[in-house]
Amino acid sequence: MPVAVDGSTASSTDPASWSTYRDAARSTAGAGLGFVLNGDGVVCLDLDHCLDDEGTVAGWARNVLDSVGDSTWVEVSQGGDGLHVWGHGRLPGDAGRRLQLGEGTVEAYATGRYIAVTGRTFGDMPQRLGDLQHVIDSLL
């Protein structure tokens, strides 16, 4: 659940409850940092439960990562067994999508969502946001 810097409940759809990175990083409220997707072209592909205990990527998720290449930032999710692929793109209607890929699930979000951010870069992925439109198009 998103928490504002003063400890009150924040909302993924109410900009009045959001803060800047600087203020959030200084705050002691909550359990860490997060990012609100607000439809400005930043998207997150959430690859649920795709890492085993040794950090090996499941085949279905490896296919997504292969499509991404080294174009954008990928982080290990808060639970430690999933990945967030961050980048630029658009979803049809900007609505979130939940896609079943074989044994795994990819959730794609562009607006109205709060994503907890760990900052734990996966492997040697670059720390920049790249273009994910070709990946989004291939998944949808």
Image (tube, helix red, strand yellow):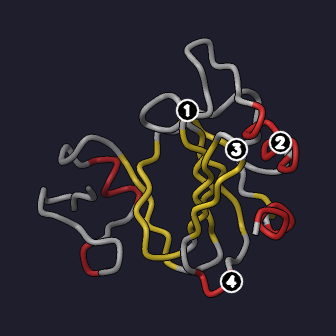
User: Number of labelled discs?
Assistant: 4
Disc 2 versus disc 1: distance between alpha carbons?
A: 21 Å
Q: Nearer the viewer, residue 49 or 68?
A: 49
Alpha carbon separation for disc pair 1 and 3: 10 Å
Of all residues, the one furthest to the bottom in this rendering is: 93
**Looking at the picture, how far across and down is residue 33, in whole percent?**
37, 48
- Closer to the chain start, of discs 4 and 1, is 4
Residue found 76% across the figure and 50% down from its top: 72
Q: Secondary structure at mark 4?
A: helix
- Mark 2 element type: helix
Q: Are marks 1 and 3 in contact (CB under 8 Å)?
A: no
Secondary structure of residue under mark 3: loop
- Check if mark 4's residue and mark 3's residue have beta carbons within 8 Å: no
Residue for badge 4: 92
Which residue matches tag 3?
127
Q: Amino acid at mark 3?
A: Gln
- Label 1: few (<14), some or many (≥20) within 10 Å? few
Nearer the camera: disc 2 or disc 1: 2
Q: Amino acid at mark 2?
A: Asn
Calculate the distance from the C-alpha at mark 2 to the C-alpha at mark 3: 21 Å
Above or below 105: residue 75 = above
Q: CA distance from mark 4 to mark 1?
A: 29 Å
Q: Which residue is mark 2?
A: 63
Three-letter code for the amino acid on which mark 4 is drawn: Pro
Quarter holding residue 87: bottom right
Dot placed on the residue nearer the N-terminal end, 2 or 3 = 2
Q: Nearer the viewer, mark 4 or mark 1?
A: 4
Closer to the N terminus: mark 4 or mark 3?
4
Query: What distance separates the C-alpha of mark 4 from that of mark 2?
Result: 22 Å
